[in-house]
């Protein structure tokens, strides 16, 4: 989970500014949450951009990492390590993109205007002998509710939303 509150990022031609980037979030939809999609959230001063991590994007990121490790002369373990690191840090690429570029990257990416957000709730998960529930961020808008499981620090997510003026 990474945020970008301390790192300057590209600004769009319209002046929209990226405030934070949050990776490794999973949206559960469908019957009993059977459909899962992984997202990176790009928090800007105007909207939240949901950038989906597709199988093709993940394969491209991992292939690039493997090729870079090979160019650096790393062996099998070095290539494998580079792929693992790339798989968990795929969202770092959004640091180099404008908000409009991130939104246009894939037809499945979408944005939620901050003006439509009614409530943001942070829910701490729990573990017992039979059930595990993940930490969640729940974004309620005028038209939909987005429940996202957090794979990482819920405190970091809360901090990023506060920095963006959303929570």
Image (cartoon, rainbow, N blue to C red):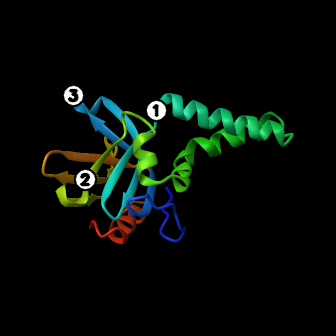
Q: Which residue is mark 2?
A: 138
- From the viewer's perspective, tell me whether residue 150 is left or right of residue 143: right
Closer to the camera, 49 or 144?
Answer: 49
Q: Residue at x 43, y 58 (%)?
A: 13
Q: Residue at x 32, y 41 (%)?
A: 27
- From the viewer's perspective, tell me whether residue 146 is left or right of residue 15: left
Q: Earlier in the sequence, mark 3 or mark 1?
A: 3
Could you classify mark 2 by the number of other residues whose Cα lies within 10 Å: few (under 14), some (14-19), or many (20 or more)? Answer: some
Q: Residue at x 53, y 34 (%)?
A: 57
Q: At which x and y percent is residue 167? A: 26, 67
Classify mark 1: helix, strand or loop.
loop
Closer to the camera, 130 or 15?
Answer: 15
Q: Are marks 2 and 3 in contact (CB under 8 Å)?
A: no
> Relative to 167, is 34 above or below?
above
The CA distance from mark 2 to mark 1 is: 22 Å
The CA distance from mark 2 to mark 3 is: 18 Å
Q: Which residue is mark 1?
A: 54
Between disc 3 and disc 1, the foreground one is 1
The CA distance from mark 3 to mark 1 is: 21 Å
Between disc 2 and disc 3, the foreground one is 2
Q: At which x and y percent is residue 111? A: 30, 47
- From the viewer's perspective, tell me whether residue 125 is left or right of residue 30: right
Q: Can residue 99 be seen at all in this image of the molecule?
A: yes
Q: Earlier in the sequence, mark 2 or mark 1?
A: 1
């Amino acid at each position: 989970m990474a945020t970008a509150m301390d790192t300057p990022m590209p600004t769009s031609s319209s002046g929209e500014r990226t405030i934070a980037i949050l990776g490794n979030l999973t949206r559960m939809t469908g019957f009993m949450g059977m459909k899962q999609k992984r997202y990176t959230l790009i928090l800007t001063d105007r909207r939240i951009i949901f950038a989906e991590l597709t199988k093709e994007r993940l394969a491209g990121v991992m292939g690039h990492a493997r090729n870079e490790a090979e160019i650096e002369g790393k062996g099998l373990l070095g290539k494998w390590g580079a792929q693992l690191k790339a798989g968990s840090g795929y969202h770092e690429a959004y640091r180099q993109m404008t908000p409009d570029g991130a939104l246009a990257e894939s037809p499945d990416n979408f944005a939620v205007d901050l003006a439509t957000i009614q409530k943001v709730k942070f829910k701490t998960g729990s573990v017992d002998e039979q059930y595990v529930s993940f930490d969640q961020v729940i974004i309620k808008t005028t038209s939909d509710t987005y429940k996202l499981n957090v794979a990482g620090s819920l405190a970091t997510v809360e901090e990023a939303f506060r920095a963006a003026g959303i929570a």
